[in-house]
Image: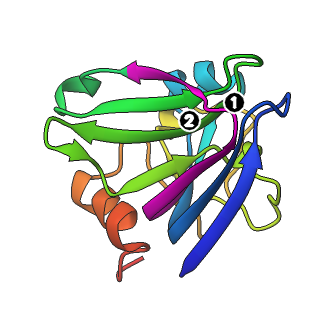
Amino acid sequence: MPITHEGGCQCGAVRFSISGEYRTTYACHCTICQHQSGSAFGMAVIVGDPVVRWTRETPSVYVREGLKGTGRSQRCAFCAKCGTRLTHQFFTDQGDMPFVSIKPGTLDDTSTVVPVFHLWTQHKQPWIRFSEGDEVWPQAMPRERMLSYMLRGRPDDA
């Protein structure tokens, strides 16, 4: 389903408009996402074939290289003034992956942001409870299933 999301950082210096195909929304409970978000988990809205336009100031970029031997790295956009993480995109030596991850709290409209699945729940905070029907993975979701979400949206068997 084609979508356009608009949003920005906490201080308002950086604004964006991202258009593309909505793929999924998820929550990751790993310790890296907890540190990055400063919260109990990190979240991502995945947009395929994205067109990203920075409409007010260009964000700074932090690159996390060589993610756990996957051959992938991650380009993370954030506001240099307030530090808000806005997006991230995986890439390899062959180029960018065909999707971008938006940090949902940066969106102007968060009314439809509901995670479809939860990853690395073995690290979740003990007070977190999941809803009936949530797809919950103690560690990483199997690579092929994750790629199905990222490239095509919800898998047929979900």
Taking the spot 72% from the left edge, 61% from the top edge, the residue there is 113
> In which image quadrant can residue 109 be found?
bottom right
- Residue type beneath disc 2: His
Could you tell me which secondary element the residue under label 2 belongs to?
Answer: loop
> In which image quadrant can residue 81 be found?
top right
Percent across and percent down for residue 21 are 49, 72
Taking the spot 60% from the left edge, 18% from the top edge, the residue there is 35
**Magenta stretch containing residue 60, yes or no?**
yes
Please say if 5 is above or below 121.
below
State yes or no: discs 2 and 1 in contact (Cβ < 8 Å): yes
Determine the CA span between mark 2 and mark 1. Answer: 7 Å
Q: Which residues are magenta?
A: 45-63
Q: Which residue is mark 2?
A: 29
- Give left or right: position of 124 versus 139: right
Q: Where residue 98 is drawn, which disc sits there? A: none
Taking the spot 14% from the left edge, 43% from the top edge, the residue there is 94
Does residue 139 appear anywhere in the picture?
A: no
The residue carrying pointer 1 sits among few (fewer than 14), some (14 to 19) or many (20 or more) residues within 10 Å by Cα, namely some
Q: Along the polypeptide, which appears first: circle 2 or circle 1?
A: 2
Q: Which residue is mark 1?
A: 40
**Magenta stretch containing residue 70, yes or no?**
no
> In which image quadrant can residue 49 be found?
bottom left
How many numbered callouts? 2
Q: Quadrant of the C terminus?
A: bottom left
- Give left or right: position of 74 versus 6: left
Could you tell me which secondary element the residue under label 1 belongs to?
Answer: loop
Does residue 138 appear anywhere in the picture?
A: yes
